Amino acid sequence: MIFALHLSVHVNHLNRAVKENTGKTTTEMILERILQEAKLLLKQGEWNVSEITYGLGFYETAHSFNFFKSHVSLNPLQFRKLDRQI
C-alpha cells in the first residue's frame, strides 16, 4: 500500500501491473528483496543478526529467523557461518 501511495496509483493497479510484468505478486517481490538484502548483510555486513532484523523491519529476531529459515532452510546464524567457511 505504501508503494502504491508513493507511486500515486491504486493498490489494485500496482498489484495487477506487477503480476502482469513479472509473473509474481507484489508481496512475493517484496519478500524476495528482503531475503536478498538479508543474505547480503549476513555475508558482507558487520551487523549482528538483531541489527539486521531491525534494519529489515522485523520487530522480533524470532520472526526474522522463521522467515529466513522458511526460505533458505537455514537460520541466519547457520547461513552466516556456512558462508564464511566457503
Image (cartoon, rainbow, N blue to C red):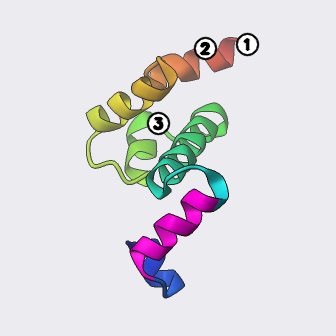
| Percent position of residue 84, x then y | 66, 18
Alpha-carbon distance for marks 1 and 2? 7 Å
Does the segment drawn in magenta span residue 57? no
Where is mark 1, residue-wise?
86
Where is mark 2, residue-wise?
82
Mark 3 touches mark 1? (CB < 8 Å):
no
* Pointer 1 local density, CA inside 10 Å: few below 14, some 14–19, many at least 20: few
Residue 14 vertical position relative to residue 37 in the rendered view, above or below: below
| Percent position of residue 15, x then y | 47, 65
Nearer to the camera, 23 or 59: 23
Q: Is residue 75 left or right of residue 83?
A: left
Q: Is residue 63 left or right of residue 67?
A: left
Alpha-carbon distance for marks 3 and 1? 20 Å
| Percent position of residue 24, x then y | 55, 49
Secondary structure beneath dot 3 equals loop
Q: Quadrant of the N terminus?
A: bottom left
Counting the numbered discs, the total is 3
Mark 1 touches mark 2? (CB < 8 Å):
yes
* Pointer 3 local density, CA inside 10 Å: few below 14, some 14–19, many at least 20: few
Q: In the figure, residue 42 lies in which quadrant? A: top right
Q: Residue at x 53, y 83 (%)?
A: 7
Amino acid, disc 3: Asn
